[in-house]
Amino acid sequence: MAGNTEYKNKYAAEKYDRVGLMLPKGRKDEIKAAAEKQGQSLNGYIATAIYQRIERDRKGE
């Protein structure tokens, strides 16, 4: 089973960038609840918010 975890870690390192995010205590739970309400993961919810902001900012250029 360790080989499987190794493979997943290697795949993730090759295919994804990692971004750390620090929030004030309690805000993570607030965002997680909002994500669940939308049927999304915490990561998916944050990524969607970022992509939407980028699009909005591009339109304002």
Image: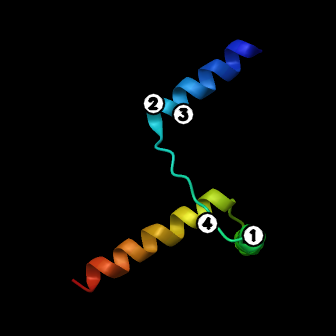
Q: Residue furthest bottom?
A: 60
- Residue named by callout 3: 12
- Contact between marks 3 and 2 (CB within 8 A): the answer is yes
Which residue has dot 1 on it?
25
Mark 2 in CB contact with mark 4 (< 8 angstroms): no
The reply to whether dot 1 and dot 3 touch (C-beta < 8 Å) is: no
Gap in angstroms between the C-alphas marked 2 and 1: 31 Å
CA separation, marks 1 and 3?
28 Å
Give the image location of residue 23, x and y in percent: 64, 67
**Few, some or many residues within 10 Å of mark 3 (<14, 14–19, 20+):** few
* Callout 2: SS: helix
Label 2 to label 4: alpha-carbon separation: 22 Å
The answer for how far apart the CA atoms under marks 3 and 4 are is 19 Å
**Coordinates of residue 10 in the picture (x, y in percent):** 54, 24
Quarter of the image where the C terminus is located = bottom left
Q: Which residue: 72% across, 73% down?
A: 27
* Residue type, mark 1 in image: Lys
What amino acid is at disc 2?
Glu
**Do the numbered discs 3 and 4 sit on residues whose CB atoms are within 8 Å?**
no
Q: Earlier in the sequence, mark 1 or mark 3?
A: 3
Tag 3: amino acid:
Ala
Residues 48 and 25: in front is 25
Residue topped by disc 4: 45
Q: Is residue 32 left or right of residue 17?
A: right
Residue 10 in the figure: left or right of residue 59: right
From the image, state whether disc 2 or disc 1 is nearer to you. Answer: 1
Mark drawn on residue 14: 2
Relative image position of residue 33 (x, y in whole percent)? 78, 72
